[in-house]
Amino acid sequence: MLFSELTESFQAMGDTRKRLELTEILRKLFQNAGDDLPQLAYLLQGKVLPDYYGVEMGIADKLIIKALSHVSGKSEEEIQEDYTKTGDLGQVAYNVTERKTQKALFSTSMTLDYVYQSLLKISKISGSGSIRVKTDIYTDLILNGTPADAMYITRIVSGKLRLGVSDATILDALALAFTDSEKKEIATTAYNFHPDIGYIADLLRKGKIEDLEKIGPEPMIPMKVMLAERLPDIGDILAKMEGTASLEYKYDGMRAQIHKKEKEVRIFSRSSEETTGQFPDIVKNVLSTFKADSLILDGEAVPFNPETGDLYPFQAVSQRRGRKYHLDEISDDIPIVVFLFDILYKNGEPLQNLPYLKRREILKETFQEDNSFKLSSSLVTSNKDEAEKFIEESISSGCEGIVAKNITDKSIYRAGSRGWLWIKYKRDYEANLGDSLDLVVIGAFSGHGRRKGTYGALLMASYNNETGIYQSVCKLGTGFTDDVLFNLPKMFSEYTVKEKPANVQSGLIPDIWIIPNFVMEIVGSEITLSPIHSTAFGLIKEKAGLAIRFPRFTGKWRNDKRPDDATTVNEIINMYKNQKKNIGNLLE
């Protein structure tokens, strides 16, 4: 397959805002890809390998600007000016290569495989002279291809492909291309246990459905974490759990999926990003605490005071994210305890299909508790008064609330699933919703008066995990400090676009659109019907969606979450239905 065939499809995807049309474009592309399908699937994600490989292109904007200057004969200052005007280095590359003054040293057939292998080489090169080699490879690619090729190659290497294509949409199109809707669920489940889109695509193309069905937990390959639904009343939670549940403290930390295989340890975040390097203390403690040859553990990494045992809030552990240096000092100043609540694999045995209490029993037998690892505090009960007391104890211990877990025979671990097997209850005394929401920034409104020169409010969205679309749910303008407000334009600058992204839906039009990337914790008074917001539009009432009334930023940026980990449309629907008080007469 020629790379130009892919860029033509990219352009067609950019021209549509309809998910069905997007899926159909992908279906045709996949059916024509042949052996190039795995590479094609990766490039659609803007990657060359899955996240857990830990490889990045590593070409900074300033190096791309330098290369485009060389290709065009324009100064770097002129290229920078063009970039400032367009906000898109890909568009600058298109404009530059349309009237390029340089030619490639060697003419090369721009097949998809050639481009992919070149990008893979860029991502793997390191050490002395690597920047020059990366830049040379990039320059060769944009000189050999069409202007459209140059545009999309530039967007890929800069990490801003901007297609608005979710993993769910890619899996839908793969199922349509090579199997049927029934098998699509098999592929989705397999991807949740083994999030390598190229690998899953190749198995689908070859018709290896049995191999897909066999995929489960495997040490050193992160699985999508299981997530909880939410309800505002503990009585309703117990009823949903068939009368009895295991209640556990909901810790305010960072999700840690810990893998051990002999002497190797890897740690992954809730979004399958490797975080091993940020937790040298956990790695050391895993090797000394757990004697099993192979393990996959699920837990929450929480900072604590070793003298008092008090738990610190999430922000303290988030200081480690992205750091490469001084981690030993941070580890000494703010040590981590991992509260473990599940085990998915032990000594060659996948455990995800065992009932929850059986997994918990195996977990308890696997280690001795100390200051490094503890079992999450739990209570199995069918009594509402006992449950209420346990919730109070969790909050007084510095936790956010509780997670109730199903203990029947159907209480398996559903990777990547958010369902009623787990239900969270998080009491927020400052918000009538009874819980916070993690929403995605999709747009911004210009500020006036004291906020002139920055943004006055942000357009926020929930995530529709069935369609892969971010749907507007509120306009957020309170809860910001002056420093945060001042920094918003700079923070969002690389993600601002003129046109609404294909994976965004909103009846309210902001001054600028923002590619979904930033997740913020929001509280509010209640959920109401809205004629302009698109979350659950038409599902509760005709010509009305749902909106958060009086939203306020808590100050917590959810850097541990990807946009598709945000609060879902279905969660907001359930919260609306479970409100003590619904205000449905606000449509004017």
Image: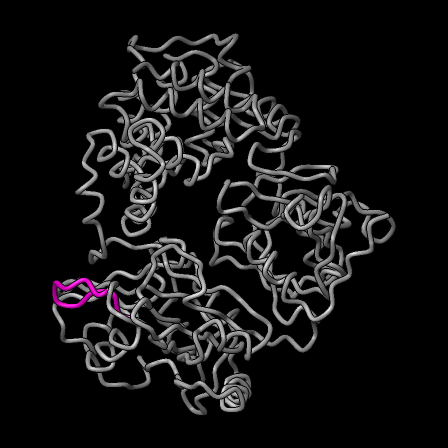
Which residue lies at the image location 27% right of the left edge and 48% below the top edge? 194
Q: Quadrant of residue 127?
A: top left
Q: Is residue 11 left or right of residue 125?
A: right
Judging depth in this view, the residue of 548 and 456 nearest the camera is: 548
Is residue 35 toward the left or the right of residue 453 in the image?
left
Q: Quadrant location of residue 322?
A: bottom left
Q: Residue at x 53, y 27 (%)?
A: 89
Q: Please indicate whether residue 356 sits to the left or right of residue 456 in the image.
A: left
Residue 506 picture quarter: top right
Decide whether residue 349 is among the magenta residues.
Answer: yes
**Range of residues picked out in magenta:** 343-351
How far across and how far down the image is residue 57, in percent? 37, 36
Q: Residue at x 19, y 62 (%)?
A: 350
Q: Taken as a whole, is the magenta stretch helix, strand or loop?
A: strand
Height in image: 236 above or below 92? below
417 vs 112, nearest the viewer: 417
Q: Position of residue 255 (x, y in %)?
A: 40, 65
Q: Where does the N terminus fall, quadrant-wise? A: top left
